[in-house]
Image: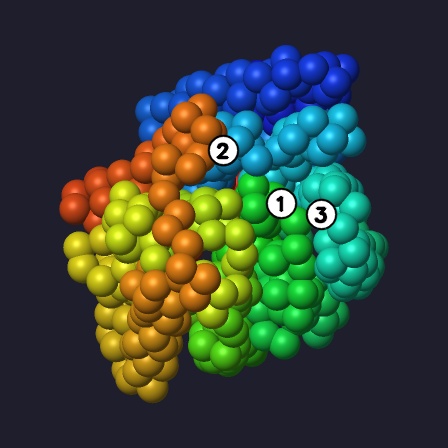
Amino acid sequence: MSWVLALPIMIPFVTAVVAFLLRRSRLGDLASVGGSVASLVAAVVLIDKVLDQGVIAGQIGGWQAPFGITLVADHLSAAMVLITAIIGLSVAIWSLAEIGPQSARFGYHALFQSLLGGVAGAFLTGDLFNLYVWFEVLLISSFGLLVIGGRQSAIDGAVKYVTLNLISTVMFLGGAGLLYGATGTLNMADLRGAVATSPDQGLMTLIAMMLMIAFGLKAAVFPLFFWLPASYHTPHYAVSALFAGLLTKVGVYALMRVFTLIFVGDIGYTHEILLWVSLLTMLTGVLGAAAQGDFRKILSFHIISQIGYMVLGLALMTPLAVMGAVFYLLHHIIVKTNLFLIAGVSRRLTGSSDLYAIGGLYRTAPLLAALFIIPAFSLAGFPPLSGFWAKFVIVQASLEIGEGLVAGIALLVGLLTIFSMTKIWAEAFWKSHPDGRQPTLADLPRSARWQMLGPIMMLAAMTVVIGAFPSPFLEFATRGAEQLVDPAAYVAAVLGEARQ
């Protein structure tokens, strides 16, 4: 089992080394795509094992938990590894059309694969300290990807990104140190019992708040989100798409894991804070998007608002709400990555991401217009797309426990999301180009055209399939939520039946 768990982490790092050695030739680009294919195969094997056997765990180096390095996969983490591999392959192919030889020589593909390995490690680790290590891998890789190209705006955005994320790192490391000093362990399964039996529950709540701030900053929740819209619109579009799909979701995943597995003794306090944070995140994100006039800036603010829905499901902490959060998490990765890739094609065709300086894509590039409608409508929650079911479950879970105001805010944010998506449609697609230009997909070189459109069509198809046939995906999310709400199987897989 250790190899099944380790391969999704190892393959991207081996690929990163190969891509770096070959970075001066086209072979480095192809190595990145090949490694992404291998990562997808490893992720499929992993999720097949999880579906067959339930929660699986492996102890690296033969040291038994809680003393060794533990890797563990349940339904949620296995699904996150799979979706990471899908997004990684999609963006790797798309990058072939955007990333030029200069960025490749600077190590783009090596950093890209290192980031994917860090994301997979964060999803599979069973230890808080190793989660910190994977966060550092993500920070280093993402900083490198932000500054590749050397543009002033990218460097400015990267400085803001790193500065605020270092604050998160300090909070995380401080909380982990206090937790280890108080309990003598950082194994997450072992911490469940150690935190529950600690004689100083006040200290446990303080540590919980420190980790909430650290992970909340990673997830870009209110009021800790300012780094995201300051940086996500500056790098290559492939980098923006990768970040939009995966980086904040690592923070959400950490919140979901820690506040269902470890810190469950003071739910009335911690989850009430998460509830208000989620609502304010939803509102500020969608209002920020409504005020923007740049394609990528609108999408960046919408990342924030949609993160609010995921945290809301965790805050409500009912099985249905957590199931909605799991489903929303997986759906949003696909949709948001796709929208940023579409924004990249739009920029390539029209020459700008300023909505008021472009237009005409509905008539000159109807295929791109149709591909935009699918994720845009899904993000807004139109049936029968995947976003409808994600929002429906969250709203239903709110109403089931009498939180009518919460449900109303969730619906209001959905309406405001429609406004923003309509704004993009009206300016970029419907109106004529202000300069009279008529950009078409035929303007792209044939190879670049399909390197860009192929991943977009694949992700759009996934959105349609999940929406049209939601039952198996909802059942999977239900099983994932059950394992989060009742982590007995997780603890048993890591520590053994006798240590539960």
The type of residue carrying mark 2 is Trp
- Asked if 192 appears above or below 400 in the picture, the reply is above
User: Measured from the top left, where is residue 455 in percent x and y?
Assistant: 40, 34
Assess disc 2: are there few (<14), some (14-19) or many (≥20) residues with their C-alpha within 10 Å of its C-alpha: many
Query: Which residue matches tag 1?
Result: 236
Helix, strand or loop status at disc 3: helix
User: For the point 17% across and 43% down, which residue is it?
Assistant: 469
The answer to whether 476 appears left or right of 69 in the picture is left
Q: Earlier in the sequence, mark 1 or mark 3?
A: 3
The type of residue carrying mark 1 is His
Assess disc 1: are there few (<14), some (14-19) or many (≥20) residues with their C-alpha within 10 Å of its C-alpha: many
Q: Earlier in the sequence, mark 2 or mark 1?
A: 2
- Asked if 390 appears above or below 305 in the picture, the reply is above
User: Measured from the top left, where is residue 278 in percent x and y?
Assistant: 49, 73
Residue 436: quadrant of the picture: bottom left
Residue 403: quadrant of the picture: bottom left
Say which of marks 1 and 3 sits in front: 1
Mark 1 and mark 3 residues within 8 Å of each other at the beta carbon: no
Assess disc 3: are there few (<14), some (14-19) or many (≥20) residues with their C-alpha within 10 Å of its C-alpha: many
The answer to whether 230 appears left or right of 454 in the picture is right
Mark 2 and mark 1 residues within 8 Å of each other at the beta carbon: no
- Asked if 130 appears above or below 325 in the picture, the reply is above
Helix, strand or loop status at disc 2: helix
User: For the point 69% across and 27% down, which residue is it?
Assistant: 101
Q: Which mark is residue 94?
A: 2
